[in-house]
Amino acid sequence: MKRMLRFALGTVVAAPAALAAVVAWPIGEPLSELNLEGDVNRGAYLARASGCIACHTDFSKGGAPLAGGVKLETPFGTLYSPNLTSDSEHGLGSWTVEEFALAVRQGVSPDGQPYYPAFTYPFYRNFTDQDIADLWAAFQTVSAVAQPSRQQEMVFPFNQRWGLKLWRAAFLEPPRTEPVPGNGDIWNRGRLLVEGAAHCAACHTGRNLAGARKTDTEHFKGSDALPGGGKAPAIDHLSLQKRGWTVDSLAYALRTGVMPDGDAFGGTMGEVVLYGTAFLTDKDRKAMAAYLLDDHSGG
C-alpha cells in the first residue's frame, strides 16, 4: 500500500512538470535565409495543384479568393481555414518568406505553435526552396482582405495545441515524393504531384482514431469518414481498374470532372477539379493518372 501511495504521489508531482515540458517543447527545424527570386506564374500553378484556392475560399458565401472561412467538421471539433491574403493584420502581409516556409513545409506558425493537420502541410514537406519562393511570390499578388480568420472550435482536449506536439511525434511522416530510379520521368512527376502537392491521400486514405492516415495498410484504399460525413472512394490501381478507369479517362476527368460513365464528380472532388487540377497541364494530369493506375508494389 505504501508503495502504491508513493507511486501515485510521484505521478501527481511529475505530471505538471511533464506537461510544462511538452508545452515548452520547441518544434520545427531551423530555417536558413531564403533569397531566391520567385516566379509568380509557377507559384500560382503550384498553389492550384496544392488545392489552396478550394480550401481557403468560401465559395458558398461568395467569399473573396483565399480569404478563408471554409468550414471543416471533424470528430475533434470544427476547423475554419485561415485568411491567406496579403492583408497585414489578418492574412500573410506581415509574414516573412522564412515564416511562410516554416508553415508550409513544417506546419509551424510564426509564433512556434503547431497547426492542426487538417492543414495538409505533411504533404508539402519536400517542397524545394524554389517552390517556396515561387509560392510566396504568387501569394504577394493576392488582394488584401481585412477579414479575421475564425477561431477554431475544437473540443477539449483537442483545443490544447500543445497536444499536437505529441501527435506530430507519433504520426508525422514525410511524403512519398522521392523519385524512384528506373520508373521514368512521367511516373515520377505523377508521384511528386499525387503524393505531394495534390495530397490525394488526405481524402483517399483511411485514418485511425487519432486522425492519422493509415499509410501502411490503407494507402489510397478510400475513406468513409471524411470531414462533414463525406466519403472518398479507393483510388489504388486495382480499384481504379475494376471501375473501368484508364490513364486517358482519368486524365480527362481531372480536367473536366466527367467520369467514364458520363456522370460528374460532385462535392469535394468536384471542387478539386474545378479550382485545382483543371488548371494543370495535360502532361501533368496524365502523369498523375499514370502514377495512380500503376502497381506501386515495387516502389
Image (cartoon, rainbow, N blue to C red):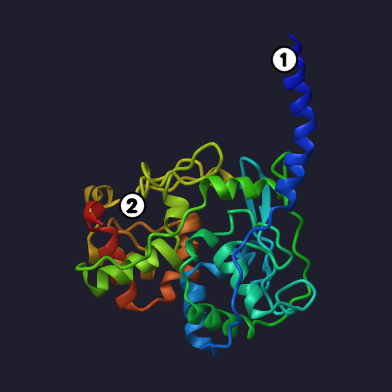
Return the residue nearer the eye: 183 or 9.
Answer: 9
Q: Amino acid at mark 1?
A: Met
Within-10-Å neighbours for mark 1: few <14, some 14–19, many 20+? few
In the picture of the structure, the residue carrying the numbered disc 1 is 4
Q: How would you rate the neighbour count of disc 2 (Cα within 10 Å): few for under 14, some for 14-19, many for 20 or more?
A: many
Residue 191 in the image: state x and y as whole percent.
Answer: 33, 65
Tell me which residue sits at (49%, 73%) in the image: 48
Given residues 207 and 267, the one toward you in this image is 207
Q: Which residue is mark 2?
A: 235
Given the current orientation, which residue lies at the most extreme left position?
182
Q: Which mark is residue 74?
A: none
Q: Is residue 273 left or right of residue 82?
A: left
Q: Residue furthest top?
A: 1
x, y (%) of residue 113? Answer: 70, 59
Pointer 1 with pointer 2, Cβ within 8 A: no
Q: Quadrant of the N terminus?
A: top right
- Can residue 118 be seen? yes
Residue found at the very far bottom of the displayed protein:
37
Q: Secondary structure at mark 1?
A: helix
Q: Position of residue 58 (x, y in %)?
A: 64, 64
> Is 168 on the left-hand or right-hand side of 90?
left
Q: Amino acid at mark 2?
A: Ile
User: CA gap, disc 1 to disc 2?
Assistant: 52 Å
Q: Residue sitting at 37 percent across and 44 percent down?
A: 216
Counting residues from the N terminus, which is met first, the one under dot 1 or under dot 2? 1
289 displayed left or right of 143: left
Task: Tell me where residue 8 sits by quadrant.
Answer: top right
Question: For this rendering, which residue is in front, 215 or 162?
Answer: 162
Can the viewer see residue 160?
no
Residue beneath the point at 78% across and 66% down: 148
Of badges 1 and 2, nearer the viewer stands: 1
Q: Position of residue 197 (x, y in %)?
A: 45, 67
